[in-house]
Image (cartoon, coloured by chain):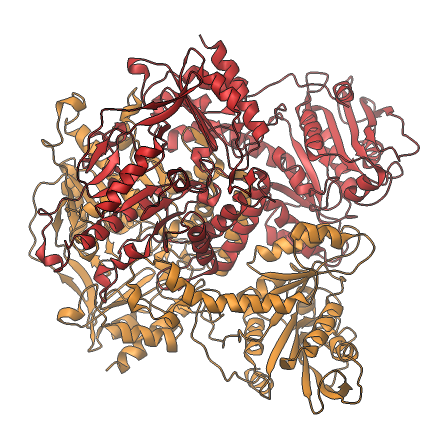
Chain colours: A red, B orange
């Protein structure tokens, strides 16, 4: 079949490098051309006149000056060959063109079918015709190419026909062919404009059972919705419209047949959307104009975090949504990304539901189902066997600020500092410090900054109020170097401290894996001295390291821990600080003044909690996450160990850390090439982005691949192999 | 018609005080009883057998042991009287009961119509019947009450029939009657179980044009969806299902007629949802069980912000979603709430779209349409004439932390502190302080705390690291007391400062309105000395004070300003820090180290930006916000000035501040009754919550009403009148 494909679908001559990183898909099809209009025609129902609209649209596009070719595609056809929408368009569209006058133009039209099912009888021939039409200059020749991709004999839904006729088609196959089609150029210099007609209604199943709206979602084609002009058609048209919106489609037009019920009038006023197909071209050109201006405008109006704007050339700004090459997102979108595309659809639906059902809830003294369900899942998951309370906030940084406030109070309470009430102590007489690690990072608000050791993030330039209120240790680290596991031990000293901020992997600090034995001994020592222990799991939580919580790897438990990032599957900000009941007790009294007076307007917002409920369950359900090993309650190994060992032995590699969803590689570098400001890994990263479809960001001289908890091992191996090739060719 | 209502619908004997504050609706209908099952039957389309399913459901409920009465309601009927779903159920349901054996039970059934349109001919009589049936004990008597609310003659959509037959019905009227029906008890001791059958498909228009799914949304009835068993029915059933989800409905069951197309099999596997009506009762009981356990569980598992848990009795916890009395939310949901119910529906749809289209976007060096559009709206709105850059973060507190970092750098740059690079200065030699106001509040992370004067929020108990790095002034304030505008001037002193944090209304500090002239002079003085000025507009932004930005009232502009809360219409957290180009310039160089290194994982997340784009536009569009005065670019006056003056003259009132969406009233109080920990206003607040359907929270001895930018003046007057009555009767 692969050979057949090559014969029938011409490869693209263009190649672009803009990207989307919203999925971790690894398809490497060529991108659709943005400059030529392409529309997907969806139906509110079967029998609403989708094909008639497609024929009209094709004729209208052919009549426009720009395109030299209009390409029509019917990916899935049942009832074939007696029903053939492609044949209908092939025959009907030319008749809708202006009649030929004196100066006739020529239209060369064709219709053919790629893959008829074995049951199709008779097999149709390819059809070709040349017609003359008017309204354009002498010698003008245009082409109309009509194609059916897969065709089945029975006039039933494709998922039934595919089963009954023994021609099953995987979604990947359909998408691959559609993407090739999208990438096709015409024969001449002119543009190719395209129309794709879906099968049945917006949510009708394709051959695998995947809905039409889901099957074509990754292509992000502007949609034309053919509504239902019949009685009851307002309802089905609006519902179909919402189904498309819930998949992220831009619906450029809604078109419907007038059956005297004024459905059009109602829909027009309700949707405030044009019902005219003439508007499609202006919709397209406005969209393109906007996308093209976005790079410039973003440079002028936005202020990106962690970014020196002068170092970002205008044309290197990635416009999300602009083109459709799915890349492997090696940053897991700032370490937040959990969803596969199925999860994303479910999250989108949940987000709509939660927004409609709850709106905003002022949280104190109130409870709503998503917040409670989320708390239950946290306490029975990452907080299992130790935590009994959940304090919600907005991001990792606020979760840490809250954790510190909890730890201070607990320490004060355990050590009698507040026994006689506040008036007996002064701020001067008691100095609270955290015991933390050099190289650690806990967020950018001042309290979170104070708990980390001095670095570029905490310089006077960044926040003159920072003083570094901690005792910062150099921890031993673990890594693979030259196929051998190494333990790196620094000259380490330490003394009495008050509180502890802790994490097994230092993320922003350069992807160092701290020796778990060291961690454990440190924690045990803190516990002996009644120093509350905080686990900063903003990065490590939710299967990042192959287990739900890093505490499983350490073999010991904290008093307080912080979560965010992966918790909501990458959809909306939400954070949670978990605590033991003993920590909670330190705030109890009969006075509001001793309560923890920290909150944000959107604390425990229902959308965030709803997303978290879905994501937390999704990651550890074998029916939704094939990586999940139910017997051992952990993720299967995602990185091929032989490959990891091989990488660690390359001459330009200093160390490799591979654990759970993370594989980090430190390049050998000296002096100014090391550290956060380093540009050493840049050329490697550029190659990965531009040649290998891997969206990576360096951390100084460290590059890393990070996947989601649901990314397949196969995909991880493919990406790691690409990195291996680049490293072997570097310098 | 009001008299007629009283005759036909019996008022409830029960009254409950749980509440929802997710809308600012002011309906005062009695709540539905939670304990008896009620279902709304929706159709995927017209003609899918909704009425047959309703009849079967009614019969099935009648066969259950618990209910003594089953009440069926058809709110909207067209094609009447030849079509009458209520009559169909009245006649059909009894025939579906078990046949009468020896020990026959009795069913007393009735059917009647409340409001037939003038065109209905002939007018139907009320029907009554008594039938015997089997399977229950001797002497058992049950009742079936079938009713049609509004009926039109023509068999077209209600919005057309209503227009043609001259019987228009407002949504409020329909909802009022439905709520009365929901609140009805039976005649005997047994329970009343209820079935409401909608008209047409889920998104078919009602008489006013409002969709079925929107018309009944506020009642939060569990939905039964009757799917479409015909060809194409999978698509319309799934789309209808998603339309209900997007309105926040819980869909308990999907039922469909088998037409041999296996639609049911596909839908079952896709939705993993029961298709059996038998499951409805267990769905109901699970739901009730869960809701009933939520108060206890929330006390055990959650840790609420700003809350001393011991002071919250279990039964005072409000379970959002539990009952359906819409209250006036006088806190505007922690000052975030903007939406009317139309905006909420649009936001829900937008949230689904954004979640599906964008997922997570790692923001640095990237741009997506919602972030750019949001930045444009901010710069042309609250940032008009001064701001040129938008820095996104997650909440007001992070927006302030970022603003401070910007101000410090700008000051350092303007005053040559960093001229020779960081190495030439030490932290000790330069102490940065903010010039701020006593009583101000800017958030709970440490940096934001440092910019506010010492208070209960900043005590050693709360955050031992707080030191109060500011020079805090006592500002003059403005208020209405005894019908006269007062200016209160404290003994004020001040000297050279480094930066300024500023806001026109002090929210959490007790709703004080700072003298704008004082503010303006202070700002002018800062500007002369090149001290960067920050406006904290987290509370005051977006029409809170009647204008989009408080700068319009002050008549001067900041260098930096902060926004959150109302910006996203109360849906998701998002914040923005705006800055002048001169501030941005202070971070430019060729080194990443001088860039502003502050960010959060979900910076500029597409869902937040999408919500902000919708909300910001909605507030200032006269077609969506009837309060918006386009000629003067401000909100109309919402609080009746005569009433405000009267309140200010009451003996127990110290001062009143009324501006834009805010009306705050300080009660006279002495000693421990004053201030944040005060319980003085508690009894008043309890009365407002329990008797007046106003959800208020006190700030010490200050109570306030806060509405959204779209709340009508009529509604404000009604609430203020209730407060007036309570104040007149207090003590």
In the image, residue A344 above or below residue A322: below
Q: How many numbered marks are there?
A: 0
Q: Position of residue A206 (x, y in %)?
A: 73, 41
Look at 37% across and 14% down and name the residue there.
A668
* Residue A245 found in image quarter: top right
Rendered position, B558 above or below A297: below
Given the current orientation, which residue lies at the most extreme bottom position?
A: B139
Q: Which image quarter: residue A210?
A: top right
User: In the image shown, does B78 or B690 lie closer to the viewer?
Assistant: B690
Residue A327 horizontal/vertical position (percent): 54, 27
- Horizontal side, residue B313 vs residue B252: left or right: left
Q: Nearer the viewer, residue A431 or A84?
A: A431
Query: Residue B693: in sight, yes or no?
Result: yes
The image quadrant of residue A496 is top left
Q: Quadrant of the N terminus of chain A?
A: top right
| Quadrant in the picture for the C terminus of chain A | top left
Front residue of this view, candidates A277 and B88: B88
Left of B662 or right of it: where is B246? right
Q: Is residue B379 above or below residue A457?
A: below
Q: In the orientation shown, which residue stands out farthest toward the top?
A: A731
Q: Relative to A397, say whether B345 is above or below.
A: below
* A117 relative position to B119: left or right: right
**Residue at position x 42%, y 45% from top?**
A573
* Residue B311 place in picture, x, y as percent: 29, 68
Q: Nearer the viewer, residue A70 or A479?
A: A479
Residue at image point 36% right, 17% down: A679
| Coordinates of residue B602 in the picture (x, y in percent) | 41, 40
Camera sees residue A689: no
């Amino acid at each position: 079949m692969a050979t057949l494909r090559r014969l029938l679908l011409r490869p693209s001559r263009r190649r672009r490098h803009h990207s989307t990183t919203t999925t971790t898909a690894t398809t490497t099809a060529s991108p659709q051309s943005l400059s030529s209009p392409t529309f997907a025609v969806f139906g509110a129902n079967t029998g609403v006149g989708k094909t008639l609209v497609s024929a009209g649209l094709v004729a209208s596009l052919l009549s426009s000056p720009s395109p030299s070719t209009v390409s029509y595609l019917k990916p899935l056809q049942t009832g074939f060959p007696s029903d053939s929408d492609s044949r209908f368009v092939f025959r009907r569209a030319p008749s809708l063109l202006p009649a030929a006058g004196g100066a006739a133009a020529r239209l060369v039209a064709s219709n053919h079918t790629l893959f008829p099912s074995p049951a199709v009888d008779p097999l149709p021939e390819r059809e070709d015709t040349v017609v003359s039409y008017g309204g354009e200059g002498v010698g003008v020749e245009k082409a109309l190419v009509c194609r059916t991709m897969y065709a089945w004999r029975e006039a039933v839904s494709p998922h039934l026909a595919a089963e009954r006729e023994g021609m099953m088609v995987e979604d990947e196959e359909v998408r691959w062919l559609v993407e090739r089609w999208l990438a096709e150029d015409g024969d001449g210099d002119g543009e190719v404009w395209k129309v794709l007609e879906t099968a049945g209604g917006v949510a009708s199943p394709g051959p695998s059972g995947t809905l039409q709206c889901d099957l074509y979602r990754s292509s992000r084609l502007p949609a034309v919705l053919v509504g239902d002009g019949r009685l009851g058609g307002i309802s089905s048209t609006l519902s179909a419209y919402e189904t498309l919106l819930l998949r992220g489609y831009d619906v450029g037009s809604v078109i419907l047949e007038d059956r005297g019920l004024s459905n059009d009038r109602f829909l027009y006023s309700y949707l405030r959307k044009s019902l005219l197909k003439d508007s499609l071209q202006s919709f397209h050109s406005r969209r393109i104009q906007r996308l093209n201006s976005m790079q410039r405008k973003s440079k002028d109006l936005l202020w990106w975090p962690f970014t020196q704007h002068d170092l970002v050339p205008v044309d290197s700004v990635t416009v999300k949504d602009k083109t459709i090459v799915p890349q492997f997102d090696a940053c897991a979108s700032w370490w937040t990304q959990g969803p596969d595309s199925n999860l994303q659809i479910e999250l989108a639906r949940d987000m709509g539901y939660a927004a409609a059902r709850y709106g905003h809830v002022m949280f104190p003294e109130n409870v709503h189902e998503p917040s409670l369900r989320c708390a239950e899942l946290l306490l029975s998951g990452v907080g299992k066997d130790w935590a009994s309370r959940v304090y919600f906030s907005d991001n990792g940084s606020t979760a840490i600020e809250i954790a510190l406030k909890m730890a201070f109070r607990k320490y004060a309470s355990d050590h009698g500092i507040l026994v006689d009430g506040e008036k007996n102590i002064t701020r001067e007489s008691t100095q609270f410090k955290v015991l933390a690690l050099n190289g650690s990072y806990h967020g950018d608000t001042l309290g979170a900054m104070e708990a980390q050791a001095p670095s570029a993030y905490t310089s006077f330039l960044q926040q003159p109020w920072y003083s570094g209120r901690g005792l910062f240790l150099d921890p031993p680290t673990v890594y693979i170097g030259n196929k051998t596991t190494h333990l790196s031990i620094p000259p380490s000293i330490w003394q009495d401290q008050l509180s502890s901020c802790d994490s097994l992997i230092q993320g922003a600090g350069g992807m160092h894996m701290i020796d778990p034995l060291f961690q454990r001994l440190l924690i045990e020592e803190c516990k002996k001295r009644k120093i509350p222990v905080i686990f900063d799991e903003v990065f490590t939580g939710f299967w990042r390291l192959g287990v739900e919580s890093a505490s499983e790897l350490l073999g010991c438990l904290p008093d307080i821990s912080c979560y965010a990032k992966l918790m909501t599957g990458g959809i909306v900000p939400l954070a949670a600080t978990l605590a033991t009941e003993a920590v909670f007790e330190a705030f109890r009294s009969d006075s509001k003044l001793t309560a923890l007076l920290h909150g944000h307007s959107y604390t425990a917002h229902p959308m965030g909690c709803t997303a978290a409920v879905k994501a937390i369950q999704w990651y550890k359900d074998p029916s939704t996450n094939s990586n999940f090993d139910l017997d051992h309650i952990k993720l299967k190994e995602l990185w091929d160990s032989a490959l990891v060992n091989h990488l660690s032995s390359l001459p330009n590699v200093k160390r490799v850390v591979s654990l759970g969803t993370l594989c980090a590689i430190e390049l050998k570098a000296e002096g100014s090439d090391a550290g956060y400001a380093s540009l050493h890994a840049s050329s490697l990263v550029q190659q990965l982005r531009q040649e290998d479809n891997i969206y990576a960001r360096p951390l100084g001289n460290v590059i890393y691949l990070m996947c989601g908890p649901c990314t397949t091992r196969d995909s991880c191996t493919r990406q790691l192999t690409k990195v291996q090739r680049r490293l072997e060719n570097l310098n």
